[in-house]
Image (cartoon, coloured by chain):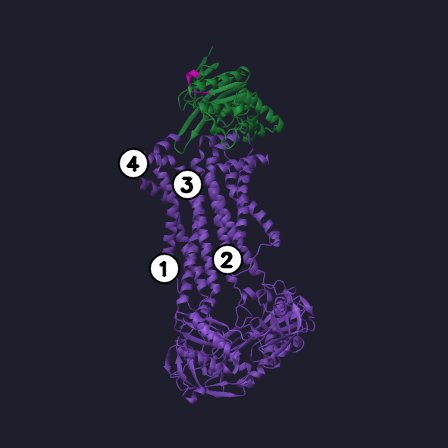
Chain colours: A purple, B green
Amino acid sequence: MIKDFIKTAFRTLLKNKGFTAINVLGLALGLATCMLIVFYVIDELSYDKFNTKTDRIYRVNSDIKFGGSEGSFAVTPAPLAVAFLSELPEVKQVARFRSWGGFQVKKGNQNLREHKVVYADASIFDIFTFPMIAGDPKTALKDPRTVVINESTAKKYFNTTNVIGKTLTLNDSLLYKVTGVIKDIPKQAHFNYDFFLSMQSLPESKENSWVSNNFNTYILLKKGASQKSMEAKLPKIVRAHVGPQLQAVIHKSLDDVEKGGDYIRLNLTPLNDIHLHSNRVAELNNNGNIQYVYIFSAIALFILLIACVNFMNLSTARSSNRAREVGVRKVLGSPRKFLIAQFLSESILVTFVATVIAVLAAWVLLPLFNQMSGKELMFTPGTFVWLAPVLIALVVVIGCLAGSYPALFLSAFQPIDVLKGKLSSGFKAGWLRNFLVVFQFSISIFLIVGTLVIYNQLKYIQHKDLGYKRNQVLIVHNVYAIGKQTKIFKQEIEKFPNVVSATLTGFLPTEGNGNSTTFFQDHTMDSKKALSTQLWSVDEKYIPTLGMKMISGRNFSKDMSTDSAAVIINETAAKKLAMADVLNKVLYYPADRYGKVIKPVHIIGVVKDFNFNSLRENITPVILTYGDDWGAVGIKIKTANVAALIDQIKDKWKALAPGQQFDYSFMDADFDAAYRTEQRMGTIFITFTTLAIIIACLGLFGLAAYAAEQRVKEIGIRKVLGANVSKIVAMLSYDFIKLVLISIVIASPIAWWAMQKWLQDFAYRQNIQWWVFALAGIGAVVIAFVTISFQSIKAALSNPVNSLRSE
Amino acid sequence: MIKITDLEKFYRTEEVETIALNKLSIEVKKGEFVAIMGPSGCGKSTLLNILGMLDDPDSGSYVFNGVEVAHFTERKRADLRKHNIGFVFQSFNLIDELTVFENVELPLIYTGVPSAERVKRVEEVLDKMQIMHRRNHYPQQLSGGQQQRVAISRAVVNKPKLILADEPTGNLDSSNGNEVMELLTDLNEQGTTIIMVTHSEHDARYSHRIIRLLDGQTVVENIMI
């Protein structure tokens, strides 16, 4: 019997090749897309899960409001770890990381630039699951000047993993003994380092300063300890340790600070939440965003729904053509269950074929998707272990869902009614199909609006006036590698004819370097008149090289000896200071970590605000001082032959810093890189939206074909009575266009609400314009009309004699 | 074999009630070949549908083989139908997706005949109807006459006691029509009771008796010699 069902199903499907192709293609496309997104989402959700103790690991964070600004930090004071371990019985182990930017690591005569380097406590191996290939996790990193590296790094520097006791030279002078080799950390980790330097090597780690936050601190709780009960004890820790030091620096108690509305708080983030839920200052890595997981999951679901709706719609539409067959079978004695089984086997067969094609398509498209999403997803035998049952379930569910209507509805009819054709009017289930078409197009319009808004916002970011000019600015990184001749390097470069100017500082807006401190308006360090701000050392070429504008006052000058105690502040800082005229006013700031040395500076100018944070955030106060920072050289150039100029600069670098890696980038590319996540998301969004629309159109195409087929007699009669082609096309299109219009009305407010929410994440955003909805609406109508036209024009052009005769 | 008494059937729309059968009483004996004639709308097809247990009457009695079936449930009627009645339609009503063989086999599947037996019986019938050579063709590949032969094969494969034919030659040319009528006559001669609705006086002449209907009532019965 089952053989009979499948045989009939095959023949029916082959007979209606067009419908079958639309069904299979639409469903396969939908399933493939859905599968890719599910891979992405699963990958995002799997971060840090490789740690066997993941449920008991937490990161300690600080939330600080002080001096008019507030921030959430992923870092804490250095001594916090010890305090936690000794004062909180729930804590089983603590470990700290201190990131320190990049290092030069010697390989032969060459210095290689390594960015994935971090200082770490020896206890990281008690907390995180980093299997060690060589060395003893208990003793590795216990001593100063020891380093644990991963497998790839061991092979890169020594061509073997048998490297215990060997030495690595960092920054030309620091010798580190390799005491352990761990397996490469999985990609799905919220931090990923190649070098772990022992924390003992870093003097700062032993300092007892509770007012500077530089250490990412992780704790392992004892079994049964809860986050809540732990967090309840944290205010006490702050009071006991931060309070006294605050008093010493700003001469105010913690209570007084809190009375003024400021605060210093600690809290915990579970390890499992860091990747998707944490976006704090000083994260160890750029984290993901749960919003994107939600958005993509929704898109996957939408696409799958659209594809299923197509399938259902076409199946129900086509089912009326099957009525006669059902009638005949019933007259011949077929029980209802046979008919139900037959319809279900047909739709399950289609779903099955579509699923097989979808798996193949997903497999073929995975590299492309990886390129788009920046992921490294793979089909592995393990994938199929969970994918196969899911797909089988999906085949059955979708197959039954799509086949259920014709199966249950048609099989219930009296054979005599079916044979007499009585069903044709009532049984088309027009309302259901209309509802489903509206549903599909609502989703499509929602996605079109979403795409337009995202596209607009990305364009806005790219073209926004940032307050500095990032085009034609070349950055040479890590110029401190040159040593004492750094300034000479900069001066030599400035002599090149194609160089407009050059500035020596690591505090370029795209470099992401920060140095926060607090300025006070009087020497008593009254916290009410405090200003939390960035403090950047720059030279006199900084403002002209970056094309920044002075609003008042003047730039630094080599010729003014008093400029060593002068500062230029940005507009935001000026506003926060709330002085009538900031020029020539004096500010005070602590020049050491303990606040014992107070330095006065005077304001000589105000620079127009420029963006240095993400455009998701508002501009914060920046104070520029006239001083040395050898992080990088920013070079404004004026040439079409950039390659030649880079060669010239590189030659100069080689002459001054032989053996040191020459590392450069372009400021505009760095800027774009900062928005790569957004851009990737934008590309993925646009791609999937297009797919969703294509799938929806496939369905509409099929439905239009069906409608034209159903109304072939009516069209014939109308033509005989004098209707012309355009009238017929209009008549056939009207029914569908009406549904699209309803969809526009439904989707627009929902899309507006959702995209408004997305945009709220950006401090600098393009508000949603009315034309976005107009464009989405017109787009949907045009797409729908073109899709339908293929069928309606064909129907309208057909010879009425044929259609009337066939009736 | 069949006895209907005071059979009534109404068709109602929201505003109009039409009487299709008006206190109709007819008896058909086993082995008879009866033709039902009358103008369009006289109730011929309605009568045939009720006789075939595809439809139920609003009132009156229908005794089939000594059993009152007028108020049988759909399931019971279906069961009785598939074992006792074969249908031949004007428009053949073959299933396009099935081959000649499979179309004829269908009633046997539904009555639970084992596979080997089915093959034997279908081949027997196809042979008798002289369309064995077309067994693997699809209906669209056949002429109208051949399609109706397949339909008749399908109607008789289960060896029904009664064949109901609704204008069996309506879609055929005269020579094909005659062939079909010959086939029905043969079947009748072998003992199958046949009730046939027709517009054609020519076809009606093949029957033993003509029942003429008008407005749902019998107006005259002609006995053919």
Residue nearest the observer in this picture, A795 or B54: A795
Check if residue B201 falls in the magenta segment.
yes
Quadrant holding the C terminus of chain A = top left
Residue for badge 1: A770
Q: Which residues are magenta?
A: B197-202
Q: Is residue A540 above or below residue A33?
A: below
Residue type at numbered disc 1: Trp
Residue for badge 2: A296
Residue for badge 4: A722
- Marks 3 and 2, how far apart in space? 32 Å
- Which of pointers 1 and 2 lies earlier in the amino acid sequence? 2
On whether disc 4 and disc 3 are found on a single subunit, the reply is yes
Residue A609 location (% of width, % of height): 41, 75
Which residue ends up furthest to the top in the rendered image?
B225
Query: Is the residue under label 2 in contact with that under label 3 (CB below 8 Å)?
Result: no
- Which of pointers 2 and 4 lies earlier in the amino acid sequence? 2
